[in-house]
Image: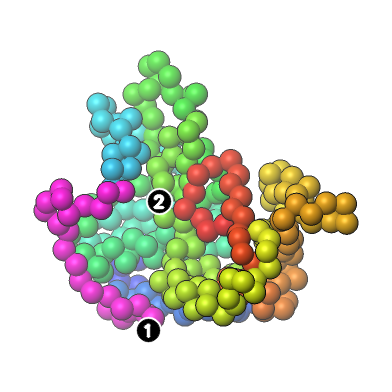
Amino acid sequence: MESITGASFLNTFMPTTRSGTSPVKINCNITACPAHDQVTNKTFGSSAEECPEFFKWIHEDLHQWKDTGITLEMVESAEKLAYIRIVVVKGRVYLKKFKWVFQTRDVFNIWGILQLLRLYPGELPDLDIMFECGDMPVIKKSAYKGSEAAKIPPMFHYCGSDSTFDITFPDWSFWGWPELQIKPWENLEKELQKGNYKVKWKDRLPYAYWKGNIWTGRVRQDLLKCNVSKKQDSGTLIYHVDWQHEEQKKFKNTNLASQCNHRHKKLERQGANSFKRS
C-alpha cells in the first residue's frame, strides 16, 4: 500500500488522457492548492444542531452495522469486489489498487479524501474503506440473510439501491471528469447559472430533452420510443451522443453550460440511485 499524501498527485496518479483535454490541471501536492480551489480551514461542529438535515442519511446507510459494529474481517471480505482500498492514518493517505478502474474515477475519489484533510486539518479520523468504482451496486441484500447478516461487508460506492447495502459516496465527477471536459462542480455550477440566462424561457424550445449515450442501458434505448418523429409529437427530444466523435470535436456539443435551450430536461435513472448528474 503506497502513501500519497505528500506526493505530487498529478505526476504520480493522474494519467494522460487520450485527447489531452483535461479542463483543470490538478496538482495535489498537499502544500500547493490548485489555482481554482480556494481552501478555507474549517472545524467540525460539536452540536447536533449544526449538522445539515441530510446528515440523517449517514445513519440510514450505516444502520445495518449498528448492532454488530464493523470489524477488520468485514472490511477485508469486500476485497474480492473492491477496486481500491483507501486508508487514512494520522492524516496520511494510503492507497491499494486491486484492479483496473475506468478512466480516472479512482483518482478523483482520492482527490475528495485529500480535500477533507486540507479543509479539516488534524480532524479527519483514521479510516479504512474498500471502494467499488463500477456503475452498479454489488453488495446484494439477498446474499446476507440469517447468520450471514452479521457479515455484511462495508463497501463504498457512487450509488446504491433498495436491494443492496452499498454505502453511497459522492460521484467522482463532483470533482471533475477531465476525459469529457466536465469541470469540478464548484466551477460548473457558476457556468450553469450564467448559461441559464442566455436564452429566455419564452424563447426556448417547448420540449423536454435528454442527451447521452443510448447504448449504455436498456432504459436509455427505450427512451428512443419517446422521441419526436413524423408519426408522433411526444414533447420529448432524445439526442444520442457518440463520445468518440465528441472527443474529436473537442466536446463542443456537450458543454453542459451551453444546453439551456429547452424548457425542460429529462432525467433518466437506471438500476441504481446515484449522485450523478444526468
> Residue 83's spot in the image, x, y percent?
49, 49
Magenta span main SS: loop
Residue at the spot x=50%, y=24% of the render?
142
Magenta residues?
Answer: 31-54
Looking at the image, the residue that sits furthest to the front is 202
Looking at the image, the residue that sits furthest to the right is 230
Task: Classify 277 as above or below 16.
Answer: above
> Residue 31's spot in the image, x, y percent?
27, 78
User: Toward which corner of the image does residue 206 lie, by quadrant?
Assistant: bottom right
Mark 1 residue crowding within 10 angstroms, few (<14) / some (14–19) / many (20+): few
Residue at the spot x=33%, y=30% of the render?
64
Look at the numbered disc 1 and give the secondary structure of its residue.
loop
> Residue 65's spot in the image, x, y percent?
30, 31
Residue 250 belongs to the span the image colors magenta: no
N-term-proximal mark, 2 vs 1: 1
Q: CA distance from mark 2 to mark 1?
A: 25 Å
Under mark 1, the amino acid is Ala
Pick the quarter of the image with the C terminus. Answer: bottom right
Q: Nearer the viewer, residue 278 or 18?
A: 278
Q: Nearer the viewer, residue 78 or 190?
A: 190
Q: Nearer the viewer, residue 113 or 98?
A: 113
Q: Is residue 52 left or right of residue 141?
A: left
Under mark 2, the amino acid is Phe
Q: Is residue 110 left or right of residue 121?
A: right
Residue 53 belongs to the span the image colors magenta: yes
Residue corresponding to mark 1: 35
Residue at the spot x=38%, y=30% of the render?
152
Residue corresponding to mark 2: 169
Is residue 261 among the parts visible in the rendering?
no
Residue at the spot x=58%, y=71% of the render?
201
User: Toward which corner of the image does residue 242 lie, by quadrant?
Assistant: bottom right
Pick the quarter of the image with the N terminus. Answer: bottom left
